[in-house]
Structures are given as structure tokens and as C-alpha cells.
Amino acid sequence: MSTLPAQPVIHEVNTRVWLRETARRTGQAAGHPAGLAEVPKDAWDELTPPGVDAVWLMGVWERSPRGRSIALDDPSLRTAFAEAIPGIGERDIAGSPYCIRRYEADPALGGPEGLAAARAELDRRGVGLLLDYVPNHVAPDSPWVSEHPEFFVRGGAADVRRDPAAFLDTGRAVLARGRDPFFPPWPDVVQLDAFAPALRRATAQVLDGIGRICDGVRCDMAMLLMNDVFARTWGERVGAPPAQDFWPEVITAVRDRHPRMVFAAEAYWDLEWPLQQQGFDFCYDKRLYDRLLHEDAASVRSHLRADERYQRGLVRFLENHDEPRAAHTLSPAKERAAAVLIATLPGATLWHEGQFTGRRVHLPVFLDRRPDEPVDQALRAFHEHLLARVHGSGMRTGRWRLLDCAGWPDNDSARHLVASCWSGPAGRFLTVVNLSGRQAQARVRLPWGELGEGAWELTDLLLSHRYGRSGAELLGSGLYVDLPPWGAHLLSAEAPGGR
């Protein structure tokens, strides 16, 4: 078992798609390998470049045949599939990885033996394994539906007549279909009852089993199970909330058996801090994502003024399987600037397989094939160099601090810059990023009083450029920076001859 660092770098992989492409590249029959156990070692190496601490194998669990049939009959989904891959056939539609029948590794991926082999390959590289957990709902053909109707939000015959899209008559019970409070019900899943004591115990048991075969879980739409959110969504159907919230009860029970197991939450609606308090190690930082894509540097700086402890519990990303590809939403220069920023912030960092090579097509998760796209070798080299240098420097083992960028009365371009630093046993490091399409200058005053007045050498970790500066300048007027549009500095500070 790998112990993940306090601020892990995670590489998300669409497992079925990646396996299929790996098989095609290595000449395995019909483009379909027997499973994860047959992946060649160089494919694992490519997935885990230096600086990656964990791989999230998205979509390993047994998908629902019934859920797949529902998807095949959905005109809107079929349109989305055809837009992603014109002419796609039914054999390429695997069904949703979030419509789970059972938490058993899919036989199409090699079953439990294949997953165990994958974990062993990652462990040999010192890389951890993350898997999915979907706490809000299960597939309509999950064994729980027939065996444990008490786990679900219930309805009655009148509900089915009134709103058949929102309720499922199993013949034994009427169960609500899964939903969140802002959208219509999802037709392919059945809603679990977060207030039911039996469901909470069953959830802990499933997570206990998952914890035996991986190092952590990414919990889908985790905020839906919080007492206040769940009560607002379901009202009188589920009764009064229990005294204890869902996640503290479940996570505590699981951590009794797996104390090092990492819990990461997909979270929205500004509920990241409450979920951290309820036991999650990390929560999605969707606010930073939105600000980087659609707002300016001032908005990003405002977000980064939050307490460092809170920020260490966030997951920074520029894309994932739910969001459009970064190469589609960002210009090449802006993407590189944003990547430098998130790679050097506190918290976990999430990268999506294909992001490094410039993939542009956002693939629906139902599909197990994606279109061929050219590999941007320069972009791959940039990302792999960035991850390796940040990891090799050890900067994120220290303490982080947001810095001010000072301009002049006749030059306000400093407002386009975001600067921060790390300091600790590994040394002193400074990041300055220009989040604009224009040249920007500023003075960045450094908080390292120990610099004194002597000479210091600043080394750009990305470009290997070296700059000599005096401690008096760095502590006085500050380091002068002049960055091109979407430019960035990633600097280490050392006294000549060593730290």
C-alpha cells in the first residue's frame, strides 16, 4: 500500500478508454485487452511520469446493463455521443460508470485480479490508487433494490402515476429515482436514503471493502448526502435529519479499519469547508476553476486569500471528466500559465489523462472509445517538466503564502499578476504568473527576513535561467518582474554556494 503525500498530485484516467487504446497500440487482438493485468509496463510508466503521486482509475466498477439500455434509448444522450464521435455504434457505448450495479471490478477490465495487478504495478512505482464511490444512488438492477428496499427513498403508487419519471415501481416497492435538488431526476439510478441507519452501515461496509484494494476514494457529488442538503431535497419523504451527519458517521467507521485511506469529495455550492470539517481530506475547488477560466487575476487572488489549512484540503484542476478539455477552453499560453499556478498551490492537484497531450474532445463517460487526436508533444513536455520540477524541488513540503504585487502610479499592470511563495526545509520558492494577455510589471516583496543584505541567486526552475539579486533589494523595494502575456516565473532562491 502506498502512503499518499499530504498534497498529492493525481492523474485521472478513463480506464476503459485507456485500456482500449493501449491494446490497439500494443497490437492486442481486436483492440480489447483481457484486462488491466495485460497492460505493458511502459504504458504504466507513461501514465505515471515523475511528480504523479496517485492514479485515479475512473470507471472500474461493474456497470449496469439496465442503465446502459436506458442510455441507448435516450435521444439527448445519443445526440451527445454522436457529437463526440460521429457514427458511433452501440458496441462503443458501455453505459455510465456512475450507474453502478455492484462494487466489483468489471470483468471487461479483468475483474478483481486485473485491478489487483494494476495496483501492484502502481505500488512498484510508489504511486497510489484512487477509485470511485457513488454514495447518492445505485443502478436499478443493483442487488440492493430487491434485497434492501429500506436503503432507499420510498414513494407510493400515486407517485408513479403522477410522476413516472421520478419514481420506479420494482413490483415490491416504489423507489425514488436519484436526483440533486436543482435538476430533474436521473432516469438510470435509484435514490439512496442518507438518513436510513441501515444504509449508513451498508455504505461503511462497502467502503471498507474498497479500502482494502486501493488507497483512497473520490466520492461523487458528496454534498448531496449532507443532512441539510438531503433534507431540502427530499423533505417529508425522509423525515427529520439524524443527530449526526452522514459523512462523519461513515468516514469514522471506515477509518477505524483504514486510518490512511484518503477521502476526496466532488463538491459544489461552496460546501467545501463543511465537507472538510465532516472528514474529507480534499474537496473539488470548482471556484478556482471558474475564476481561472472566466475572471481576472484579482478574482483569483481573492480566492487564494483563504486560510492555508483550508486550501490544503482543496483539489485544484483545469479539467476532469465532467468539464470541457482545457485545450478547448483555454488558449495554449493561458493553459500553461494556469498550469504553473495550480501546480504550485497548496492542496491536491488533479490532471486528466489526455490533458498533457492537448486533447480537445470532451468525451461522454458512457463511451469506451474516443476519436484520434494529434499529440501535442511540446505541451506534453511542458507538463511533464513542470510536474517533475515542482516535485523534485520539494517546495510543497513547506509553508505557502500569497504575496502582494506592487505597481506604480503610471503602471497598474501589476493587477494582472498572482504571486506566492513556499519556504521550508527544501528551500525558498517563488511563483509569479501573469493571468492576462498583456505585458505586466511589478515589484514583489519577499517575506524572508533571513535573506539579509547579501547576494542571492534566483534560478528559474522551468527555464534554468539564473538571476543575481541582493537581499536588500528583495526585502526592500522587492523583486522586479516583467512578464509577457500569460508568462510565469517559478524561482528558487539560494545564497551563492548553497542555501
Image: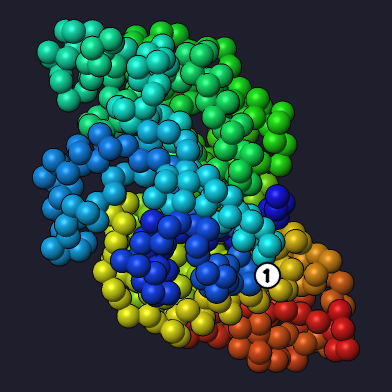
- In this picture, is 339 found above or below 211? below
Tally of marks: 1
Please identify the quarter of the rendering in which residue 152 is found. Answer: top left
Report the residue at 13% width, 40% height from top: 73
Residue 234 seen anywhere in this rendered image of the structure: yes
Residue 219 or residue 409, whichever sits in front: 219
Residue 383 or residue 329, whichever sits in front: 383
Quadrant including the C terminus: bottom right
In the picture, measured across the screen, residue 452 lies left or right of residue 156, that is right
Residue 299 drawn at (x, y percent): 46, 58
Q: Which residue is mark 1?
A: 391
Residue 326 seen anywhere in this rendered image of the structure: no
Report the residue at 37% width, 13% height from top: 149
Residue 97 or residue 321, whichever sits in front: 97
Residue farthest to the front? Answer: 29
Coloration mode: rainbow
Residue 485 drawn at (x, y percent): 43, 82
- What amino acid does circle 1 point to? His
Residue 387 drawn at (x, y percent): 60, 72
Report the residue at 15% width, 50% height from top: 78
Residue 211 drawn at (x, y percent): 62, 38
- In this picture, is 106 found above or below 80? above
Graded by Cα atoms within 10 Å as few (under 14), some (14 to 19) or many (20 or more), the crowding at tag 1 reads some
- Assign a secondary structure to mark 1: helix
Report the residue at 51% width, 81% height from top: 382
- In this picture, is 340 found above or below 225? below
- In this picture, is 388 found above or below 56? below
